[in-house]
Image (cartoon, rainbow, N blue to C red):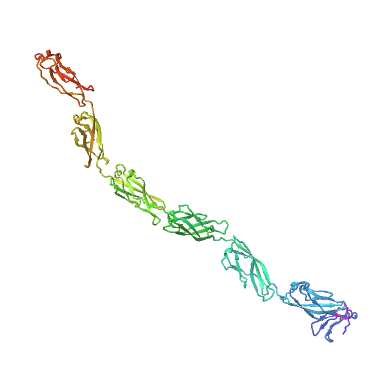
Amino acid sequence: MWIDLWERWRQQLVRTSATRRCRVNPRRGRRFSGLAGRWRVESLERRELLTNSPPIVDDQSFALPENSTNETIVGTVAASDADLDALSYAITSGNTNGAFAIDASTGLITVANPAMLNFEATPIFTLNVDVGDGIETDSAVVTINLSNVNEAPSIAPASRSINENLSLGVGLGLPFTSDPDADDTRTVSIVSGNTGGAFAINPSTGVVVVNNPAAIDFETTPTFMLGLRVTDAGGLTGDAIWTINLIDRNDIPTISSATFSLPENSPNGTVVGTIVANDQDAGDTKAFLLGQDNLSGVFAIDSAGVLTVANSSILNFEARTSITVHVQVTDSGQAWAVTTFTVNLSNVNDAPVVGSATITRNEHLPNGASIGVLSSSDQDANDSRTWAITGGNVDGAFAINPTTGLITVATSTAMNFEVTPTFVLTIQATDTGGLTGTGTLTINLANINEAPIVSAGTFSLPENSVNGTVVGTVPAVDPDAGAVVTYAITSAAPTGAFAVDAATGQITVANSALLNFETTPAPFFFVRATDQFGMSTTNRMTVNLSNVQEAPTVAPRTFSIAENSANFTTVGSYSATDPEGGSFTWSILSGNIGGAFALNVVTGAVIRVANSAALDFETTPTFSLVLQAVDSTGLRG
C-alpha cells in the first residue's frame, strides 16, 4: 500500500499494535510495511508526490562471546530493496559507548569497544539500525546476545608497614580481589617474594598471616615484595604485588649454648672458649653476665664473650668432672637472652700437697727417736708418694723414711739447742707421676740442762818449771748458756805436781820438784767439771814434759887425813850426778891452801895429797875444798 507524501505535509505515524514508529521526511514519500489498517496518519502535509520502493529490514539477533576483541565480526544486518538501490546502514541507538561498529555499505557489524562487552554488566545489546536507499529508510532492532565467558579475576596491589619480629599467626590484612563472573569462587596464594617463608595465606579467605617470625627481620629483609595470585574456578589468574615494609625494632639477641673442654687446675687467666651471641641490630653492644651457678667465681667473661679461668682452685676433676653455668647476654636496648655452657674437666696428674707444722722436741734425743710425719694429700686416688728432706737438715740431724714419711733423729749431737735452737726442714713428697709438693716442718728444740763437757787435754811444759807456772786451761765447755762451772783435780800421777783454779780451770805448777823428765816424762791428772746443777764430767789431762839440760850435782863430803901425809896419798873420791848422764871435768875452785891437794886428772874424782908440807894440823886443821864438775854441755856443779 502506498501513501503519497506532499511537500509541507507533516505526519506522524503511530503504530497501534506495537511501539514501532517511523519518522517521515516531509519531502519524500514513505512506504510502511505491515497490514492495512495498522497505521494511522496523525498529520500530513503534502508538498510533492514521489514514487520509490523503500528498503526492507526486519528485526534480527546475533550471538557474541563477551570480551571479544576489536573487529570481531558479529554478523551482517539482512536488508532488501525492490529497486535494488544501494543501501546504507547506521546504528542509531543502543550502541553504548560505541561497543559496535556497522559497515555503512554492507551492514557488517563488528566489535569496536571490547571493554563494553561484559556479560555481567550488559548481557544484551539492543541496537536500532536504520537501512536507507538514499530516499527512504527502514529501521529494525538488532539484538546482540552476549554469551558469558569466564574472565580472569583481579587482585589489588597494596602496601603495608609492620613491626619486625611479629608473633606467629599475626594477621597482616586481606587482599582485595574481584572477578567479573558473579559467584565465581576465588583462591589466593603467594607465588613470589616470600623470603624464608615469612608469611602464609589462607587459601580460602586470603588473609595474610605471619608464618615464620624469625624471617621477619628488618636487618635481613627490610622489605618483602610478595607476589599474590588470585585464581578463579576456571583456572584463570590475576597477580599483584603486596609491598610489606618492616619497621625496625630492638631485636632480642641470640646466644648459643656451648660445651668446652679444659684440663683441671688450669691457671687463672686460661682462655676456656668464647660464648657466641648475635644481635640483628647493627651497632648494638652486648654485655655478658654469669649466673649464680658460677661456683666461687670459677670463670670470668669479658664484653666479647671470652671465658677465662678466674678461680683455678675449683677446677678439680676429683671433686667434679664438669661445670655447667648459666650466661646471660643483654643488648644496649635491654633485651636479653640466657643459655648455659658446660666445661668438661679432663683429669691431670695433681701434685701432692704437703702440710706444714711447728713442733717442739727436746735437744739431744737419741738416734732413731721419732719426730713425726707431716700431713699430706693427693687428689689422684691411689697415688703413692716418696719422701725426702731437701733443705734445712743442719749437720744431718734428721732422717726421713722415703715410704712412710716418718722423720727420726739421725744425729743426736746435732740436736743442740745452744748451736741450732730451731730446725726448719723442707719436706718434699713426689708422686708416681714425678710431681712434687713441699711442706715445712719447724722443729724448735727445748733446752735441756747438760753436763759440762771436758775434753781430754794435752799440754807441754819444760821439766823443772817453777811453781805457779801456767800450764794451760782445762778444755771444758758447758752447752748451757750462763752455766757456772767449777773445776777440781780428782787424781794425779804424780800427786800434787799441778793445781787447777776452781773457777777458771787454769792449770799451774804446784810442785816443781816433781816435774822431772827423766823420771816422769808425762805426768797426768783427772779434772772434773761440775755445773751449778751438780752435773759433771771428768777427763784426763796429760802434761808432756820437755827435757831441760841440768847441771851436774856434787854432793858434799868430809874426809880425814893425817897431817904431813905423803904426796900422792889418796884422800878420797868424789862423785857427781847428772840427769842426762855423761862424763865430767873436775877442778878445785877454792880452799886448796898451799896447793895441798890435787885431783887425779884421769879419774878427776880422786883427791890426792899434792903438797905434804901444807898438811899442818897446827896451821890448817881443816881444808874446805870447793870442787867443780863440768858436764859435756859446760854446765857446772
**Left or right of 57 on screen, residue 605:** left
Magenta stretch, main secondary structure class: loop
Quadrant housing residue 462: top left
Q: Is residue 6 left or right of residue 302?
A: right
Q: Is residue 12 above or below residue 342?
A: below
Q: Is residue 157 visible?
A: no
Residue 297: x %, y % from top left: 45, 56
Which quadrant of the figure contains the C terminus?
top left
Residue 72 horizontal/vertical position (percent): 78, 73
Q: Percent from the top left, x then y, of residue 565?
A: 10, 15
Q: Nearer the viewer, residue 451 or 189?
A: 451
Q: Is residue 265 visible?
A: yes
In this rendering, would 610 be left or right of 31?
left
In the depicted view, which residue is nearer to us: 520 or 524?
520
Outermost residue on the top side: it is: 613
Q: Position of residue 206 (x, y in %)?
A: 62, 71
Q: Quadrant of the N terminus?
A: bottom right
Q: Is residue 260 left or right of residue 443?
A: right
Count of marks, rendered view: 0
Residue closest to the far bottom? 37
Which region shows up in magenta?
80-85
Q: Residue at position x 23%, y 27% from top?
A: 548
Is-magenta flag for residue 297?
no
